[in-house]
Structure formats: C-alpha cells, structure tokens
Image (cartoon, rainbow, N blue to C red):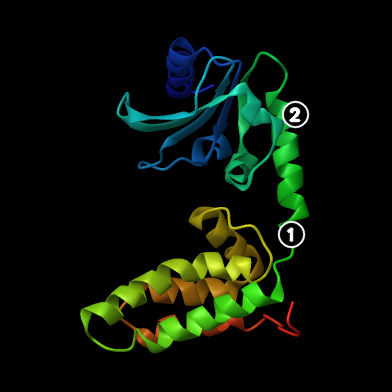
Amino acid sequence: MDDLIQSAIDDLCGKYHPHTVILYGSYARGEPGPESDIDFACFSDDAVEQKDARLFQGVYLDAWVYPSSALEEVPQESLRFGDGIAVVDNKSLGDAYLTAVREKIAQGPDPRPQSELRHNCEWIEKMLSRSQSANTDSRYRRTWLQFELLELYFELRNLWFLGHKKSFAYLAEYDEKGLALFESMYNLPEDYSAMKAVAEHVMQTVELSGNG
C-alpha cells in the first residue's frame, strides 16, 4: 500500500480507534490527481459522527468518523463508498458492508412518482425562461440551473447520482452526445443556447402520464 495512505490510516487509527476503515474515491480507484483528496470512512464503537478534514503530509485528508451502528443500514449518502476498499476490517464488517452498498447501487433508486418528474421538468423550463436576461438575477438562475442539470439528468432517468466525476464517466460510456452537451455548457457558461440544449437533452427521454 502507498506509504501516504498507510500513514493516514495509522493516524486515523491512533485518533479514533476504528475497527473498520474504508478508503474510497480516487485513491481507492487508483487514479488520484495532484488535487485529489484522500477519502476515508472510519467506524468505531466509541465514536460520534464527525468529520476530520485537514492537510496531511501536503495532501487534503477528508475523513468521516461514524459509530458502529452506521454499518447497519445503507443510506443514499453511503453510496459514495461503492468504489471503496476496506483497508482496516478487524471485525470482518467492512467487506460485507461494501457488498451491501454495491448491491443497492445495482438495484437503483425506487421509481419516483410521475408528479415529481413533472415538477422537475417544470422547474427546468421555468429556470430557462428566467435566465435569459443579462441582469444579476438571471445570471444567478443560470448558474443555479447549470449546477442542477447534471443531477437532474440522473434523477429523471431513475439512476443514482454519485457525484460529478462518476456522472461524467457514465456519460462517456453510455451517452456521448450528452457528455458533449454538458462539456459545451460548462466550457461556455455564458452561452444560453448551450445550456438550453443540455436542458432539452435532460428532459427528452422523460415520459409522463397520469397523475401518479
């Protein structure tokens, strides 16, 4: 294991005495960049939920500490551990928990009601209409919509939104046209037509019916 990662594990174990430590994110995937955080989730019998975020040997450490009871369920926020590795697993709970996380990811979210899908599409259309001007309010709404559209792409297709990096990777594999549209919008944030093209693409596969 990388010396930096092992040093971070030793540091966290010394502070929080976890029986389970999960490394996740870019370091777990073996693709860290120069600005990547080291992401950990630690589980300890004595812990209260807290965050430990700091510089560690020149790299930003982003660690969450949880009580052991957190391993009893898989909330949506835990899906970010899907690419994780149990680097400490003294009670043989880490690998089992990661398996449960990956199973939930594979199952996908519960279908959203038609009323929620309609509301999301109506919100997108309203934001489009209110972000065409050059005033500060319109620019704010444009920035807001550009931020929300990526997550809405996945929500409207009943897919998990797992953060921007995994979302762009998904688009690269399954929707190259969509990726190109998002890239154009984020590279040209002042171009209303680029944002409108993304919004239309986000909504185009949504089929709405009834009052559900």
Q: Is residue 98 left or right of 3 when viewed as pictured?
A: right
State the count of labels. 2
| Secondary element at tag 1 | loop
**x, y percentage for residue 93?**
71, 22
Q: Residue at x 40, y 89 (%)?
A: 129
Sort mark 2 into few (<14), some (14-19) or many (20+) by Cα contacts within 10 Å: few
Q: Using the numbered discs, state the Cα–Cα distance from disc 1 to disc 2 in whole angstroms.
A: 23 Å
Foreground mark, 1 or 2, reads: 1
Instruction: Mark 1 or mark 2: name the one nearer the start of the chain.
Output: 2
Q: Is residue 68 left or right of 95 when viewed as pictured?
A: left
Q: Residue at x 59, y 15 (%)?
A: 45
Sort mark 1 into few (<14), some (14-19) or many (20+) by Cα contacts within 10 Å: few
Kind of residue sitting beneath label 2: Ala
Quarter of the image where the C terminus is located: bottom right
Q: Is residue 188 visible?
A: no
Asked whether the beta carbons under mark 1 and mark 2 sit within 8 Å of each other, the answer is: no
Residue under label 1? 110
Kind of residue sitting beneath label 1: Asp
The image shows residue 84, relative to residue 150, as above or below, that is above
The image shows residue 61, relative to residue 196, as above or below, that is above
**x, y percentage for residue 47?**
51, 19
Q: Residue 86 lies in what quarter of the image?
A: top right
